[in-house]
Image (tube, rainbow, N blue to C red):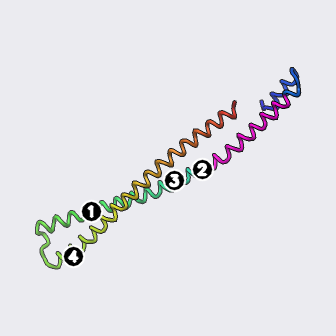
Amino acid sequence: MSISELVTVLRTAYKIEDFDKIEQELVKREAKFRAEIGPLREKIELERLKRIEVEERLKIREEQCEKGKRAQDNYEQLLKEVKTGGLVEKHAIEELRKKNVALEREVYELKEFEKKMLDDVNSVDELRDKIRVLKEEKVGDKNALDV
């Protein structure tokens, strides 16, 4: 039953003025709660979209990190071959030096990238916490409306 229907039932048994006041107050509270729920729903949706965006960026960064790990492995393999004397020709050594410099630069960039990725992971965790709090507030608001 709605608030108005409940008040109508009560009016038949008691003073009408008192129930008119109660009905006005209850209707006002209901409108207030409904007005508060709208922005909270929008906020939850925005947080959800932000979380999705951050998760996509995290996935891209993880792929880049994996690429960097493969580059590091290639670098270590080439370095091992050079140390064992498998590539002693002057031209090959010069080529390996160039690759070594490029790989060291890539390793440095990957370390910087890893720092950024950790920041993004922390951001995702914060967004998840915010979403959880907003959902709890939403549940609390629904419970308040049900009362």
Q: CA distance from mark 1 to mark 4?
A: 17 Å
Sequence-first disc among 1 and 4: 1
User: Toward the viewer: 92 or 44?
Assistant: 44
- The residue that label 1 is drawn on is 72
Q: Secondary structure at mark 4?
A: helix
Q: Amino acid at mark 2?
A: Glu
Which quadrant is the N terminus positioned in? top right
Q: Which residue is mark 4?
A: 95
Precedes in sequence: disc 1 or disc 2: 2
Q: Residue furthest top?
A: 13
Is disc 1 placed on a helix, strand or loop? helix
**Amino acid of disc 4:** Glu
Relative to 58, residue 18 above or below: above
Q: Residue at x 27, y 67 (%)?
A: 104
Which residue bears the numbered disc 3? 52
The overriding secondary structure of the stretch rendered in magenta is helix
25 in the magenta segment: yes
